[in-house]
Amino acid sequence: MASVFIFIRELFQQRYIFFTLVKRDFQNRYLSSAIGLPWAFVQPVFYLLFIGFALHFGLRGAGAKGGGIQMPHFTIAMIAWLYISQTMNACTRSLTDYAYIIKKTSFNVSFIPLVKIFSGLIIHLFMILIVLFTLIIIYKVSPTLHWFQIIYYLFSTIILLSGIAWLVSSVNVIFKDMGHAVQLAASMLFWVTPIIWSYEKLPGNYKYIALLNPFFYITEGYRFTFLKQTWFFAYAEMNLYFWSVTSLILLLGVVTFRNLRKEFGDYL
């Protein structure tokens, strides 16, 4: 607990540097090209449109009423997954991207992976607003008080991603193949996470297989928030499992980062 308070205190003390890096990272990722900011939305929007087209017309029965995941259910879960997958890939190379800071300043190195998480969060928030506007205008979805619990799920996502970020970014400094492993894992997790298929189709106890994936908690939580009008505390077992797994991932990430940090200077 003492380490947690020290970490929070240092983050508060260096908050101006941290948010400056978040702003600069956002500008480098999305504003450095000729077209600029629109590129941040072009990829996810086209991704949603093409997969949505395949979902509606290509997959057997997927677009039929009651035949599978409907477009609003797919879109809500997909914007959560896009943020998760893109952030994991960005965090993997975060330390190598900011090697000049690690070598030349006294900035807390452990904050660097968080820069990628928060710079990606900016676009994610805009995507949420766009999707909600679409739900209201096209699908006639009415806003409810449940929409406010998106704050909880954003917090949950950031905590989970922080553990993953500290783990993969520190390992990637020494083992450069980590980037390829994360990309492969993200591709696999997309298909095993109930995004374009419904976990309710799994027979019997096989439904609980979906619960083993902590990302399912996030994607389904977005559906709870905006479509199903269900509070997150309605499923105690799901909450307990997610936070247990997330705590273990966070602990593993912190321990790995601390143990490998002394090696960063030799490899960067």
Image (cartoon, rainbow, N blue to C red):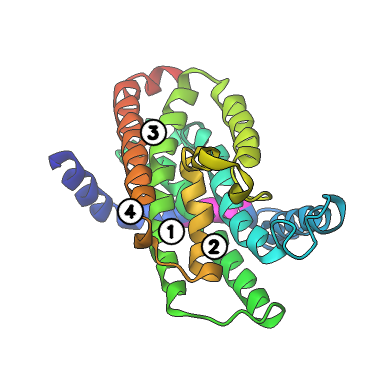
Q: Nearer the viewer, mark 4 or mark 1?
A: 4
Q: Position of residue 2 (x, y in %)?
A: 13, 41
Which comes sooner in the sequence, label 3 or label 2?
A: 3
Residue 122: in sight, yes or no? no
Q: Amino acid at mark 4?
A: Ala
Q: Secondary structure at mark 2?
A: helix
Crowdedness near tag 4: few (<14), some (14–19) or many (≥20) residues, C-alpha within 10 Å: few
In this orientation, which residue lies closer to the viewer: 35 or 136? Answer: 136
Q: Is residue 184 magenta?
A: no
Q: In the rendered structure, which amino acid carries the disc numbered 1? A: Leu
Identify which residue is drawn at 46% across, 50% down: 217
Tag 1 residue = 154
Q: Which mark is residue 223?
A: 2
Magenta stretch, main secondary structure, is helix
Residue, far left: 2
- Marks 1 and 3, Cα distance to the nearest angstrom? 28 Å
C-alpha span from label 1 to label 2: 13 Å
Residue that sits furthest to the right in the current view: 57
